[in-house]
Amino acid sequence: MFQLFHEIPEQHLSFLDKLEMEVFKAQLSERASDFNTALPRWKKQLEITQEDHALLIEGFYPNLFSDVLHDDFYALFYKQAIFWLDSGLSQNKALRLLDFVRAELLKYSDDLDSPALGAALSNFCQIGALTVRLVYDLSSSLEQIKQRSTNEIRRLRNFYDLLAHPAAEDVFDVCFQHQAWKELAFELALGRNADLQAFDPDHLKSRVAEWLEADGKTKIPEREIRQFIQAHEKVHLLGVMAVDASRNSRSKDIIALLNEMERNSQIVMDTLLDILERELVSNVNDDALKGFLNGNLLEIEMERTCAFAKRHDFWLDLIVVGLGDYKESRVALDHIAQAIKLLARTEDMLFYVEEQQVFVILSLGKETEGAHIFANRVFNSIEHDHVVLEDGRSVKIDIPCGALSYWAGLSLPTNDVMEALMHQLHLAESSPKASVKYTVLDVIKHPAQEGRSGSQSQDLEEDADDVWC
């Protein structure tokens, strides 16, 4: 189990110590001016150069002994530690400052000739030091939790981004929303001015609850559903209790509540991450799109391949294959994907762009006709194939196909090259009959050289319309 916080020993001010301080409360309060006089010296010793940098919260010394018998000093030390943390003071300097306070108070006890008061004040300041450690450890632990909470999610997201499959966005969203609520509870428990409006204590109004109500329960193994629901409810309950403890200055309760909240949160996250991993494995084992990269990587690979082509004087061959009238059919998608994989060479890079529902093939060639030839092979291998769709209909698949040969020496922006490629697909889609549309982007036809662009087409009678601009 991940250790959230360093162990902090319990320490309480004894009743005799409290009584001793109560007896001398009036005399100690009278030394406020001496205490304030020492502040500039402490600031210099701590090498704090800002003139307006306050060392202590307003009213620190007058409130230090205001109600010792009822433990008000715990709340004061907690607020002071939060103040130091938020002002950017390091933990070491905060503890050194408490040592200065302790030394100053011991001078006052010497003046009062009371060794018992000196011992009480020393124990008193020790509780302040423990509170500082608590607050700084809480803050450090919050950062660790944020890091740990997102690492596994980011890792799975990266795996999804490598695959030509849509990510399980609903589960990712549930993960992030759950983490955001928990982190907000930590911030509020630390007394920070976080977004209180976003802190809804009702677990039934959370994103997790919405997901469960929709179809979330069907994705969780039946034996784990009850534990998941209970853990999620406890996360909200414990988070609310921790924030309440902070508002009511019960600093001693906060660490235990947050620790238990994180333990239950881990149960929630483990279940959600298991779901993501199962869906990831299912996608990897999917025969249809196995071997296709996610469209998110297309731009990156385009830039890398263009750089290589430019150095070695290759043509960049791009082929785009649409789904035509079968965008709603998984059977048709699988059939087209299999046909492309059978024709692709080892060095060809295959992508599936889920947002646009198109396949893209990226390759290199020494001749301008490479993309055109490959596109025709794909087109001919699929044209008029009979496929039985999900509804039982047997249809002949006709696909629109676009191709482009690009001379990388032009150094065109990737978006411009992709726009030219997609233009060929649009021409193929709008053609009266299924066809391959093809164009060449080279130094002669580039607009920067001649002020115009050119293209070639499989259907010569349509050349006048087949122009990328």
Image: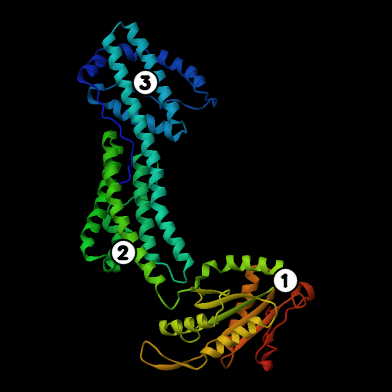
Horizontally, residue 350 falls left or right of residue 62, namely: right
461 in relation to 125, above or below: below
Label 1, label 2: how far apart the Cα atoms are:
53 Å
State yes or no: discs 1 and 3 in contact (Cβ < 8 Å).
no
Q: Earlier in the sequence, mark 1 or mark 2?
A: 2
Residue at mark 3:
61
Label 2 sits on a secondary structure element that is helix
Horizontally, residue 388 falls left or right of residue 220, namely: right
Label 1 sits on a secondary structure element that is loop
- Confirm whether residue 279 shows in the render: yes
Q: Residue reaching furthest front?
A: 346
Give percent across and percent down for residue 153: 40, 57
Q: Earlier in the sequence, mark 1 or mark 3?
A: 3
Q: How crowded is the residue under tag 3: few (<14 C-alpha within 10 Å), some, or many (20+)?
A: some
> Residue at (26%, 46%) from the top-left corner?
238
Give percent across and percent down for residue 11: 26, 26
Q: Residue reaching furthest right?
A: 450
> Residue at (68%, 69%) from the top-left corner?
309
Q: Which mark is residue 211?
A: 2
Give percent across and percent down for residue 108: 35, 10
**Residue 456, image quadrant:** bottom right
**Residue 344, image quadrant:** bottom right
Q: Earlier in the sequence, mark 2 or mark 3?
A: 3
298 in relation to 252, above or below: below
> Residue at (47%, 65%) from the top-left corner?
161
Label 1, label 3: how far apart the Cα atoms are:
77 Å
377 in relation to 270, above or below: below
The kind of residue tagged 1 is: Asp
The kind of residue tagged 2 is: Trp
Front-most of 164 and 25?
164
